[in-house]
Amino acid sequence: MENVLGIINLINEQNDLSTLTRDRCVGAVPFAGRYRLADFALSNMSNAGIQEVVVLAAPKAESLLQHIGNGRHYGLEALHTLAAQHDDELQLDYPLDYLKSRAEKYVLLAPSRIIYHSHYDQMMDYHHNSGADITVLFKHLTEMDRHAHIGHAYSLNINDQGRVVGAAPTYHALPSLSPQNIDLDTMVLERKLLIDLIETSLKPGKAMDLKQAVWEQLDHLHVQGYANHGYMAIMDSVDSYYAHSMQLLQPHGWRQFMEHQESVYTRKEDETAIACHQQALIRNAFVAPGCRIEGFVENSILFPGVAVHAGAHVKNSVIMQDCMIQAGAYLDRVILDKQVMVEQGAVICGEYAHPFVAEKSGVL
């Protein structure tokens, strides 16, 4: 897509991800055994032919910036970063000078905390054909989607013509039971309008974020909704991260997630084969290359380099890169951040839907 600037916005992303974001931003959180959350937005932009992408980097983004590098492994011609100095509600003004210096007519804004597959080129065509000032991406949840963990989001009121006529904040710590249109925090608009909205949000007495500035002007702006279909996950809490991870281990969840994964790009690491001892037992698990399994792994996701020693038992858990579970340890409903060591014979259990989380490089 020509004449479109892509922006991945890491600033002010709602999250209750506990220690998973102690030393990293939301976009750097690992997911599904091999990806970082920001990989999905960057891949969507690359697949749509957007060649100029800017990452608005929040504090603690160092590991993500190292991961995304120059953007070549996403197929991008140019990937720029603009770093915020503070992560607060009024940091929307910092890219203004940069935005004013750009030549693109349109901007496509996307988050990292929400992952989905979308054809942004088709969304742009829809935007042009509708004559809208702004087009926002949404997911229509029905009673069939009651498993969906929504977290922090806006619920949109969309009329029969597809126009957004109302928006209200919503939060669901538990699965939703009522049909609704969930805003995916992604929108297309002209660059000059984006600048106007940012400047409006910064006026004395306003103190609002960008989306609030959009919703406040629904009577004056034509905001159109564009429906996204297929897999969607909002990662803004430990519970939602865990729920979406466990859903990948269900047949329907895995099929839906994998439907477009050939077009999701990430930094390739040196991979070695999985070493599986003859006494090991693996049931319904995703085990990444480089793992060494001697014990029992069930209904779990293991990132590269994980070692499960003989007699250790890992159930219903997410084990990130280079963790070591020593002999006789028992883990159930646990998230281990990178490089955690679980000592011999340790027993660690979380609660249903509320996992135990161990911080990076910890010893348990």
Image (cartoon, rainbow, N blue to C red):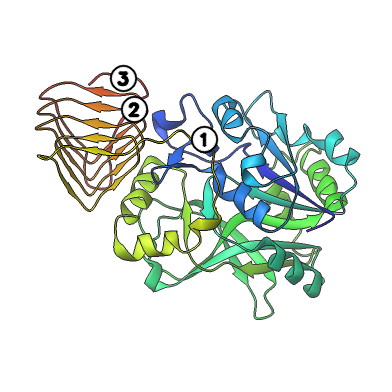
Pick whichever of labels 1 and 2 is earlier in the sequence.
1
| Label 3 – label 2 distance at C-alpha | 12 Å
> In the rendered image, which residue does mark 1 sit on?
28
Which numbered marker is on residue 50? Answer: none
> Residue beneath label 3, please?
362
| Along the viewing direction, whichever of 250 and 78 lies nearer the viewer | 78
**In this view, 242 is above or below 269:** below
SS assignment at label 3 = loop
Question: Could you tell me residue 81's position as x and y percent?
Answer: 71, 32
The amino acid type, in three-letter code, at marker 1 is Ala
Q: Earlier in the sequence, mark 3 or mark 2?
A: 2
Nearer mark to the viewer, of 1 and 2 = 2
Q: Secondary structure at mark 1?
A: helix
Q: Name the image quarter holding residue 89.
A: top right
Q: Is residue 52 left or right of residue 184?
A: right
Q: Position of residue 204 (x, y in %)?
A: 80, 36
Separation of marks 3 and 1 at Cα, in angstroms: 19 Å
Kind of element beneath mark 2: loop
- How packed mark 2 is, by other alpha carbons closer than 10 Å (few <14, some 14-19, many 20 or more), is many
Name the amino acid, label 3. Answer: Gly
Examine the rendering and report whether any part of residue 147 can be seen: no
Q: Residue at x 34, y 42 (%)?
A: 288
